[in-house]
Image (cartoon, helix red, strand yellow):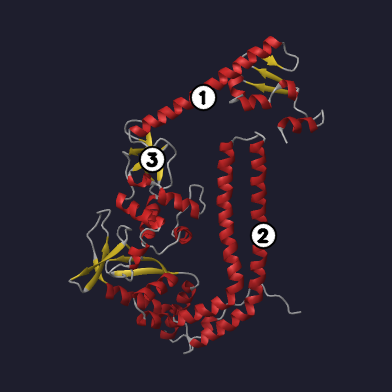
């Protein structure tokens, strides 16, 4: 429905009769705007304050003619302004400065010459570098990388999760190498790069699927490649073989901020194995928790069903909003640029909802099975790690641990949920047993605390 048709449906009391505006070029930006506010069709008066003129259905033909000339002049002014803006941006790009809003990982700031350029964002730049380094390992999909980045603390400027599509745009963007493409033209940048051109090209190969065979044909499947970070500078720990026999890990030294520390792979294996002992749940406790899972399964199912219903309703509301925006764009109520901006924001939010839906649907179906399997894995984690080859060791560690850091000869890591809870309780149980505060089976420490909100039985 056009703006004119909507206006006609309004009652005389609520219909717009007068529009007050500063001058012509503040009201119209193109001929489409002019046609929508045609006084002959809308039956309105338009008062141009600075020009001291009024245009309405009853205006003289000469006044309408002069007004149309002013509209043409406003359109010419708008076109010229756009051309000059694009020309200025192109000249700025030719000088090696990014001429637009800074991408994630950078922020806009004025340089010594007084002109605005981009500089690394101290909060987000390390996360962007980590995205490139992690993706080259070939172990992460874009969705996995988005989840991992969120767990590591990477957020958009509005504090939200950086979704899969945004991750892909980052990995495809050459700007992080110090060079950039603007309006299909290549430019050499003068700002500080975040990554090397070589790293960017390796990521493009992975994205294009060109190096799948290379990953399969590698001479050595390093057990912990891309998994551990240097505790001094945050760069990745990479592996190399010495004397065709010994495997050592060390920091890439990309930031060149400290003395490089080397560690044998066997040492890392030993320290990882010691960590896994922290989640060895006693068998009697394992059986007790499994029974508790069976009892709570019904409540868990109800929770997931209600959450899925709410998420689906939210998704449908967003989709309805997109349809309304599209109709507004077709009817000329909003510009195509505004529609594109809003629809992209809504689509990003819908992607988050889709991911949440998938998680809840899977959890609803596999809650009980997964809980029992987690307990079994926790009980046997140390045993499995010691016996398995490098590839399986890595798979197990990726499932159980996160944020692995090596510093001053010691390996540090965090257990993922729910293994973090198991580790905390197991350490406490050992402490009490050593202090003589608990019996051998350590059973009482695993019992949940009494509910403070007690309800009388029916």
| Element marked by disc 3 | strand
Residue 102: % across, % down: 42, 41
Disc 1 designates what residue? 79
Q: Is residue 228 visible?
A: no
Q: Of circles 2 and 1, which is in front?
A: 1
Query: Separation of disc 2 and disc 1 at Cα?
Result: 47 Å
Residue 447: % across, % down: 56, 81
Residue 207: % across, % down: 41, 56
The circle on residue 178 is none
- In this rendering, is residue 262 above or below 53? below
272 left or right of 290? Answer: left
Answer with the quarter of the image where residue 64 lies: top right
Disc 2 designates what residue? 310
Disc 3 designates what residue? 181
Mark closest to the chain's N terminus, 2 or 1: 1
Query: Separation of disc 1 and disc 3 at Cα?
Result: 24 Å
Residue pictured at 58% horizontal, 21% vertical: 25
- In this rendering, is residue 309 above or below 15? below
Q: Nearer the viewer, residue 75 or 237?
A: 75
Residue pictured at 35% horizontal, 30% vertical: 114
- In this rendering, is residue 67 above or below 32? above
């Amino acid at each position: 429905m056009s703006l004119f048709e909507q206006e006609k449906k309004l009652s005389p009391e609520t219909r717009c009769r007068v529009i007050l505006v500063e001058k012509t070029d503040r009201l119209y930006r193109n001929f489409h705007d002019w046609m929508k506010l045609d006084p002959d069709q809308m039956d309105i008066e338009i008062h141009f304050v600075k020009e001291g003129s009024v245009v309405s259905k009853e205006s003289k033909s000469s006044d309408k003619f002069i007004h149309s000339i002013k509209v043409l002049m406003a359109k010419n002014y708008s076109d010229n302004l756009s051309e000059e803006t694009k020309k200025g941006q192109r000249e700025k790009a030719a000088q090696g400065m990014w001429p637009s809003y800074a991408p994630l990982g950078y922020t806009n700031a004025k340089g010594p010459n007084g002109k605005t350029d981009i500089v690394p964002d101290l909060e987000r730049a390390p996360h962007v570098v980590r995205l490139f380094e992690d993706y080259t390992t070939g172990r992460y999909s874009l969705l996995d990388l988005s989840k991992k980045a969120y767990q590591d603390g990477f957020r958009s400027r509005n504090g939200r999760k950086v979704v899969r599509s945004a991750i892909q745009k980052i990995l495809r963007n050459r700007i992080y190498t110090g060079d950039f493409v603007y309006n299909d033209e290549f430019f050499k940048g003068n700002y500080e790069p975040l990554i090397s051109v070589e790293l960017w090209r390796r990521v493009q190969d992975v994205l294009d699927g060109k190096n799948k065979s290379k990953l399969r044909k590698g001479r050595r499947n390093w057990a912990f490649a891309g998994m551990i970070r240097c505790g001094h500078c945050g760069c990745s720990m990479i592996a190399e073989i010495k004397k065709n026999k010994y495997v050592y890990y060390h920091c890439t030294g990309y930031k060149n901020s400290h003395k490089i520390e080397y560690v044998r792979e066997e040492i890392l294996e030993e320290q990882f194995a010691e960590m896994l002992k922290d989640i060895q749940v006693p068998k009697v406790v394992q059986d007790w928790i499994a029974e508790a899972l069976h009892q709570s399964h019904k409540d868990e199912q109800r929770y997931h069903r209600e959450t899925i219903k709410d998420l689906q309703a939210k998704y449908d509301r967003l989709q309805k909003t997109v349809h309304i925006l599209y109709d507004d764009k077709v009817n000329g109520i909003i510009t195509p640029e505004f529609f594109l901006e809003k629809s992209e924001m809504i689509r990003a939010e819908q992607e988050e909802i889709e991911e949440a839906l998938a998680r809840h649907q899977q959890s609803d179906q596999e809650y009980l099975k997964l809980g029992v399997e987690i307990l079994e894995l926790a009980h046997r984690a140390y045993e499995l790690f010691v016996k398995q080859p490098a590839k399986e060791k890595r798979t197990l560690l990726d499932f159980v641990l996160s944020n692995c850091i090596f510093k001053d000869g010691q390996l540090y890591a965090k257990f993922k949920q729910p293994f973090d809870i198991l580790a905390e309780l197991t350490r406490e149980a050992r402490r009490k047993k050593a202090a003589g505060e608990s019996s051998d089976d350590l059973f009482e420490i695993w019992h949940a605390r009494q509910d403070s909100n007690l309800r009388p039985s029916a």
